[in-house]
Image: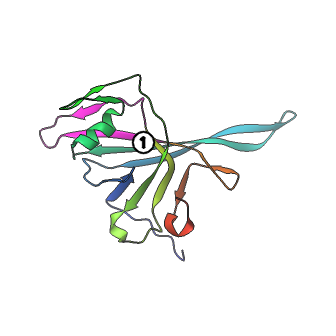
């Protein structure tokens, strides 16, 4: 990458082989570091990264059976629908790819949450608006061990780097 370019605009999100494209509002990726202070005697000597709080909030206008299952997260199948099932919490991580649409096919500005899962603490949020209805999904990221180091996300060409 010879120059720094920040893509602005719409994105496409791929999670569990499902592509999400139709958003009610902006999608927001956050990676908030959590540090622990390091001391030597009484002197503060620096910080050490304990973890990242990684999340992606996605407000969707695309309401399908698949997106509802993602938004409700824990459910029991029925013939014509599904029930909520709060006892079925699964935080198995899967790669989530955020691809800025305005840069075309290149992956050099993609953001990958390496171990993403649907946040079970967000709850089901369905908004009925005059302008546009929407449902919200929030993904959280867990760490993944790569080359004996913990990582939460990757920015760049994940395909060429063999990240996922």
Relative to residue 134, is residue 13 depicted above or below?
Answer: below
Residue found at x 53% / y 70%: 160
**Total count of labels:** 1
Q: Residue furthest top?
A: 87
Quadrant containing the N terminus in the rendered view: bottom right
Provide residue 15's location: percent of width, then percent of height: 39, 50
Residue marked by disc 1: 139
Residue found at x 33% / y 68%: 102
Quadrant of res 89? top left
Quadrant of res 87? top left
Look at the image and give the residue range highlighted in magenta: 119-140
Relative to residue 29, is residue 128 depicted above or below?
Answer: above
Provide residue 43's location: percent of width, then percent of height: 83, 37
Relative to residue 88, is residue 14 depicted above or below?
Answer: below
78 vs 29, nearest the viewer: 78
Quadrant of res 49? top right
Please say which color scheme the image uses: rainbow
Q: Secondary structure at mark 1?
A: strand
Residue found at x 32% / y 32%: 72
Provide residue 93's location: percent of width, then percent of height: 49, 43
Q: Residues within 10 Å of mark 1 (few under 14, many from 20)?
A: many
Residue 116 falls within the magenta-colored stretch: no
Relative to residue 126, is residue 110 depicted above or below?
Answer: below
Residue found at x 24% / y 47%: 24
Residue 128 falls within the magenta-colored stretch: yes
Q: Residue furthest left?
A: 130
Q: Residue furthest bottom?
A: 2
Residue 82 is left or right of residue 11, and the answer is left
Residue 149 is left or right of residue 160, and the answer is right
Q: Residue furthest right?
A: 41
Residue 75 is left or right of residue 45, and the answer is left
Provide residue 12's location: percent of width, then percent of height: 34, 58
């Amino acid at each position: 990458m010879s120059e720094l370019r920040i893509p602005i605009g719409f994105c496409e999100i791929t999670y569990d082989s499902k592509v999400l494209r139709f958003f009610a509002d902006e999608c927001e990726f956050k990676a908030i570091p959590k540090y622990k202070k390091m001391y030597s005697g009484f002197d503060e000597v620096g910080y050490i990264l304990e973890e990242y709080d990684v999340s992606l909030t996605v407000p969707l206008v695309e309401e399908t059976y698949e997106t509802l299952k993602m938004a409700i997260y824990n459910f029991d199948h029925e013939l014509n629908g599904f029930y909520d099932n709060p006892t079925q919490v699964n935080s198995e991580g899967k790669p989530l790819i955020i691809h800025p649409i305005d840069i075309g096919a290149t992956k050099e500005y993609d953001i990958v949450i390496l171990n993403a899962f649907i946040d079970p603490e967000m709850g089901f949020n369905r908004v009925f608006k005059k302008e546009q209805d929407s449902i919200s999904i929030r993904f959280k990221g867990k760490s993944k061990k790569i080359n004996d180091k913990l990582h939460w996300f990757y920015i760049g060409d994940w395909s060429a780097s063999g990240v996922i």
